[in-house]
Amino acid sequence: MKKIDPEQVPDVFEAMTDGEFEEWVLGTLKPKPTAQVALRIPVHVLEHAKRAAAERGVPYQGLMKALIEQGLERLDRLSA
């Protein structure tokens, strides 16, 4: 895989305020087809996700899915 310098790739999230980013991520929580998976993650990450979701009044699993999706889209932009 070609190594890419992240500094050379524009990041649409960098221009967003924290509030705009949060609004955008929460907007991705619309229902989509899903598949069940088992995933082991560190306890502190799960606890952090649950706290963050509770503060926003959304299900933690939905928030985690949205954040994973956005992270993958960011990787796609870096490798394009």
Image (tube, rainbow, N blue to C red):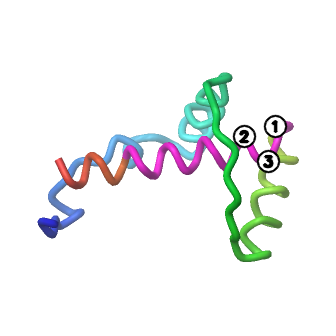
- Is the Cβ of the residue at disc 2 closer than 8 Å to that at disc 1? yes
Left or right of 72, for residue 60 = right
Determine which residue is flagged by label 3: 60
- Residue at point 70% right, 59% down? 38
x and y, in percent, of residue 63 in the image: 70, 44
For label 2, count other residues whose C-alpha is less than 10 Å away and answer few (under 14), some (14-19) or many (20+). Answer: some
Determine which residue is flagged by label 2: 62
The verdict on residue 32 being magenta is no
Determine which residue is flagged by label 1: 58
The answer to whether residue 75 is above or below residue 69 is: below
- Is the Cβ of the residue at disc 3 closer than 8 Å to that at disc 1? yes
- How many angstroms separate mark 3 from mark 1 (CA)? 6 Å
- How many angstroms separate mark 2 from mark 1 (CA)? 7 Å
The answer to whether residue 23 is above or below residue 71 is: above
Secondary structure, mark 3, is helix
Secondary structure, mark 1, is loop
Q: Which residues are magenta?
A: 57-73
- Residue at point 15% right, 58% down? 8
**Dominant secondary structure of the residues highlighted in magenta in the image:** helix
Q: Nearer the viewer, residue 8 or 34?
A: 34
Left or right of 50, for residue 36 = left
